[in-house]
Structures are given as structure tokens and as C-alpha cells.
Image (tube, rainbow, N blue to C red):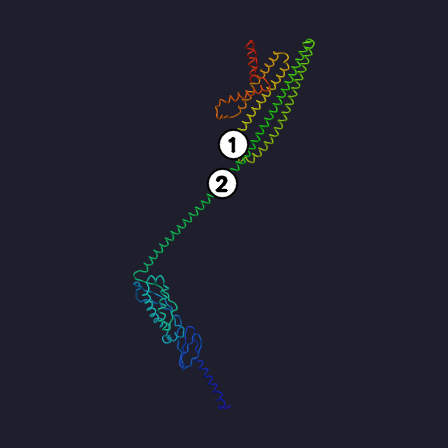
Amino acid sequence: MSISVLIPILIPILIAIIILGILAAGYVKAPPDKAFIISGLRRKPKMLIGKAGIKIPFLERKNTLDLKLIPIDVKTASTVPTADYINIKVDAVVNIKISNKPEMLELAQENFLDKPAGDIAPIAREVLEGNMREIIGQMRLEEMVSDRQKFADLVKENAGPDLAKLGLEILSFNVQNFIDDNQVIENLGVDNVTQISKKAAIAKANAEKEISIATAKATQEANEAKVAAEQEIAKRNNDLAIQKAELKKQADIKAAEAEAAKGIQAEEQRKTLEITTANANLAKQEKEIELKEREVAIKERQLEAEVKKTAEARKYAAQQEADAKLYETQKASEAELFERQRKAEADKFEAEQEAEAKKATAEAEKFAKEQEAAAVKAQGLAEAEATKAKGEAEAAAIKAKAEAEAEGLLKKAEAMKQYGEAAMADMQMQVLGKYFEQLPAIAKAVGEGYASVDKIVMLGDDSSKLAGNIMNTTTQVSEGLSNSLGLDLKSLLAGFMGANLAGKKEVTVNIDEN
């Protein structure tokens, strides 16, 4: 193959290689923190930030803008008067950079193309310091010190347009320190410390006051709760005492009822025994009267045949006396048997009552002490009433006995009426003797009714009426005897006394004094 044939083939290849070489030599790639400006053939420069591009060698050029952060320490070279004419110095740290906005990049190209950060920082420092001095003159010291952020924002707002004309922007502005030669800031701090201390002291005092008020209120509430609790305890103790008193009262009532029932039962037994005894005595007296009547009949027969009938009369009298004794023994046995039965029933009733009383007493024993005095008083009154009733019953029994004996003698006197006035007088004398024989016993029984009483209180009269009451009771017994027998004891006694004085005859009455 000839060279003439190869030339048309190699020329395009060589052209392509040249083009590729040119392209390879003009390839550029910008990092993110740099801006590549390609200018030459283009009417408007091309800017590459963080991307690749082609620069035509020999025809175009590449320039660089550094987009890195530029820290600047901004200080006022001399003192600057504030709005309140206090000279201070300000130290601040500012971070700036070339802005990546297109319009600001164009300004930065004109001012800082291919310049390092070290050349940009002094220019920006002068702009920042001038604006900072301007803001210092517009603000009061206390305002700047107390609100640094406001000061920084004002400096940024004031310096921002000036830096933007250079293609720069402020990223941050931090005030490090405010310095004055007259220690005004320090004095402001002292005043603030004083004010803060004052406010703290006031707050502490208020807090202590609130604590004291809360403590007093809590103490008051606790005391009220304690008082309420103690009142409730006292109320419940009082209710318990009342319940105890009620239980003790019921126990005492049961005990008193049992004791009274015991006394009444004993009194009824005693009265029954006395009535039985009186009936036995009355039967005895009836037998004696019958015996006397038979004696009278014997005497009548004796007039007819005194000698013949004497032995028979004596025999008959002995027989009748034996019959009377036998009858008396039978009645006494019956009375004793009746008394034993009554006593057994009384013991049974008493045992039942005592068991019931003991049961009630056992249930209320712990509540009994408070009402003990009242129980003793009630028991004393009950015993006094029982003793009084006993004395009255004994007096009534003796009265009945005397009436029975006198009535027997009266029957005997009627039976012997036919023997004349002498026999009648003899019978009346026997009746009178029986009366005087029983009179001391009647008085004694009436007096014993008052003997067991611990204390007698006379209301409305003097105590001398007590003896008069005893005598009146005795007189009432005598009057009852006179009414029941139909005899006037006073007239009978006066008649005998008159007869004895007229006839100067002695009459002896035997009175058994106990």
C-alpha cells in the first residue's frame, strides 16, 4: 500500500488525536470549596464550583476564588465611647466567606480573584471594625453587656451591606469581651450582684414566710384533728360508761328483785308458819275450852254422884287431856311439815333467783363499780322495808294469837256463864291476864320492826313521835282485840280495879316480861 493511500486515512486519525489531546489538556474539575472562573473566548466567564469543565488551552484561562471559611479576630484598636459616654474596647470573633451567590461571586471576582484568604481577612476586618465602632456609639454599655446577641445582630446588619459589595457574607459574629479602663462593667456587676442578692434574700424571706405559714397551718390542722380524735374518744368512753351503768343498773335491779323476792318468800313462809302455829294454838285452846266444858259437865254430874263419878271424871279428864296433847302434837307436826315444804320451795326459788342474779352479775361485773353505792343504798332501803314488814307481820301474828286466846277464853266464859257472876268475873280476869301477858310481846314486836333500821329520818316533826308511834301501834292492837272479842278492856280493867278497892281484895295478874 502506498503512502498516498494511507495519507487520507491517517489525517483524520491525527486530527482526532490532536483534538483529544487538546481536550485532555483543557479538562478542569473544581472542588466544593473553590470556584474556577474560565474566561477568554466566552462573552461571560464560566464558573465551576464542585463540578468539571473544559478550558480551551491557549485561548481560555482559569482563575480561582477561595470559598473556604475565613475566621477574623476583630478588636477595636482604641477605646470607643458608648451612647452613655463610657469608653470601652470590644473583642469579637467573626467568620466570613466569599458568597456563592452569582451576583456576589461576580463582585468577589473583581476584588479577590486568585487572592489567598490571608489577603481577604485584613480588608474584611477593617470593614467590621468600622461598623462595630459605629454600633458601640449607638448603644448603652449596660444594654450591650446584658444583651450581647443584640449587639452582634446590629453589627451584622450594619456591616452586611458593606461586605456584600466585596462579595463577602458574615456567617457568625460572637462578642468575646467588653473591656473598660474605669471598671464600670465590674461595678455594674457588683450592683447586679447586690440586686440579685437582695432579690434572693427577699425570695428566701418570702419562701421562709410561706414555709412558716404552711407549717402553722399544718400544725393547726394536726391539732384540730387531734382534738377531734380526743373528743370522739371521750364521747365513746362516755357511751361505754353509760352502757356500763345501764348494765350495772339492770344487774342491780335483778339482784334487788331476787333479794326482795327472797325476803318476801321468807316473810310469807314465816307468816304461814305463824298462822299455822296460831291455828294450832287456837285448836289447842278450843280443846281446852272443850275440856273445860266437859269439866263443867263432870262437875254437874259430880253434884249427883260426887264420889261415884270422881274417878270416872278424872279418867275422862285425863283421857281428854291426852287427846288434846295428841291433837296439839299432830297440829305441830303438820305445821312443821308445812314449814319444811315452804322452806324447800323458798330455797328452790332462792337458788333459781340467785343463779339468775349471779348470771346477770357475771355479765355486768366489770361495769358494777360505778353503781355500787346506789346498789348498797337500794339494798339498805329494801332491807329496811322488809324488816319493817316483818315487824308488822309479827305484831299482826301476835295480835291474832292474842285474839284467838281471848276468844277462846270468851267462849269458855260463855260456857261457864251459868255458874254465875263469880265464874264470869273469873273468866274476865283470865282474859285480862292473857291480854297483859301478850302486851309486852306486842310492844316488843312493834319495836323490833324499827330495831334493824340503820337510820330513821323524821320529816316535819321531832323524833319524840317515834315512841308515840310505837305506843299508838300497841293501842291499835288493844283496840282491835277489844273489837274482835266484844270486850271493853278499859271498862273491864276499871271495874275490876273499883271492885278490888271497894272490897279491899287483891287481884294478882302475872305478866311475863320478855
Give the vertical position of 31 relative to 267 (above or below): below
Foreground pick, 239 / 27 = 239
Please state the horizontal and vertical placement of residue 238, each as a whole percent of the image. 50, 39
Residue 33 located left or right of residue 244: left
* Image quadrant assignment for residue 355: top right
Q: Amino acid at mark 2?
A: Lys
The answer for how far apart the CA atoms under marks 2 and 1 are is: 24 Å
* Image quadrant assignment for residue 280: top right
Identify the element where label 2 is drawn. Answer: helix
Q: Earlier in the sequence, mark 2 or mark 1?
A: 2
Label 1: how many Cα within 10 Å (few below 14, some 14–19, many 20+) = few
Residue 42 located left or right of residue 399: left
Foreground pick, 178 / 431 = 431
Please state the horizontal and vertical placement of residue 346, each as a whole percent of the image. 61, 28
Please state the horizontal and vertical placement of residue 400, each as a whole percent of the image. 59, 21
Q: Which mark is residue 513?
A: none
Which residue does the numbered mark 2 point to in the structure image?
235
Q: Amino acid at mark 1?
A: Ala
Q: Quadrant of the C terminus?
A: top right
Please state the horizontal and vertical placement of residue 347, each as a whole percent of the image. 61, 28
Foreground pick, 441 / 57 = 441
Which residue does the numbered mark 1 point to in the structure image?
374
Foreground pick, 146 / 177 = 146
* Image quadrant assignment for residue 339: top right
Q: Are marks 2 and 1 in contact (CB under 8 Å)?
A: no
